[in-house]
Amino acid sequence: MTREGTIIAAMLLALSAVMAMGFVAAPAAAQGMSANEARGTNISGQWRGSRGLVTRGADGKVIFLYGEIQPSVVCSPLQVCDIELQAGEVVRDVLVGDTVRWKVEPATSGAVGGQAIHLIVKPAEPGLVTSMVVTTSRRTYHIQLKSHQSQYMARIGFEYPEDVSTRLSDINARLEASTIPGAGVPAEQLNFQYSVSGNAGWRPTRVYSDGQKTYIQFPRSMSGQDAPVLFVVSGGQDRIVNYRMKGNMMVVDYNVDRAVLVSGVGWNQDKITISRGG
């Protein structure tokens, strides 16, 4: 055998040994990922693997906070997982990575016009992992599906950030409704033990104090009109104290015990007396 033939035979022998071990070298570009690709898969992996918040809802429903993480729903063969979406939400597409061993069927609940869509998920065997994307009229769900031999989540639902914001707004509105105008504090923290005597078209409808300031509320018709002059009775003498008008509310920078409101002069003068504890 020539020298060239010997070299070729050696190269073929070496290649045969490599192939016998089940290893065939691949191009460098196919073996690795770019820096951006690696970073992207890492970010996606962190999102998919995050624990997130899981709480218990009504009737044993497992509740995920929508958008926080990729929910991981555990199902079991011969059982069904019920994934309930928001009432009134219309499903457009359901895409499953493994359509052979995972079956997803739609169902509905609720009255017409406010129906909720349910996705009934059934795996063919345990030990499966795939992903599901659900597009609706309001949002897109990215869900991981896992199958277990015996453990499963019977009912799954979602808490939506916008619903939380709406409920918070409702609570704030109720709190504001229970807050007395002017004082800006709940009614139970105010002193309403004031008596009002005298007659005038602008006679106050309510007087109360928060311990530092006194609030004198006039009829709504008083707004835009000249307010009466306030005199606080102290030491047997009438003296003027600082106050300001906010619409039909007079805010007095003083904890009033007794005061007199005066409007007009002579025969046309109107006088109202305010007393605390009377």
Image: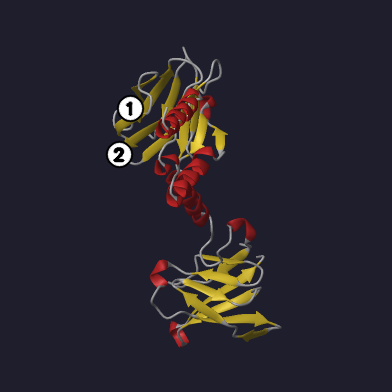
- Secondary structure state at the residue bearing disc 1: loop
Which amino acid, by three-letter code, is at mark 1?
A: Ala
Give me the residue at 67% from left, 65% from top. 277
Q: Earlier in the sequence, mark 1 or mark 2?
A: 1
Q: Nearer the viewer, residue 66 or 210?
A: 66
Left or right of residue 209, residue 226 in this image: left
Q: Position of residue 242 (x, y in %)?
A: 58, 83
Left or right: 273 in relation to 277: left
The residue nearer to you, when weighing 116 against 248, is 116
Q: Residue at x 44, y 18 (%)?
A: 123
Disc 1 crowd, CA 10 A, few/some/many (<14, 14-19, 20+): few
Q: Residue at x 66, y 68 (%)?
A: 211
Disc 2 marks a residue whose amino acid type is Ser
Q: CA distance from mark 1 to mark 2?
A: 18 Å
Residue 111: mark in rendering:
1
- Pinpoint residue 153: horizontal percent, then vertical percent: 51, 23
The circle drawn on residue 137 is: 2
Q: Residue furthest front?
A: 2
Quadrant location, the N terminus:
top left
Looking at the picture, tell me which residue is in the foreground, 169 or 181. Answer: 169
State the image coordinates of residue 215 (x, y, percent, origin top left): 56, 70
Residues 10 and 226: in front is 10
Looking at the image, is 196 positioned above or below residue 153?
Answer: below
260 shown above or below 168:
below
Q: Which mark is residue 194?
A: none
User: How many C-alpha atoms fall within 10 Å of the one at disc 2: few (<14), some, or many (≥20)?
Assistant: few
Q: Position of residue 109 (x, y in %)?
A: 36, 24
Side (left or right) of 239 relative to 75 = right
- Please determine whether, in this image, residue 230 is positioned above or below residue 158: below
Q: Quadrant of residue 94?
A: top left
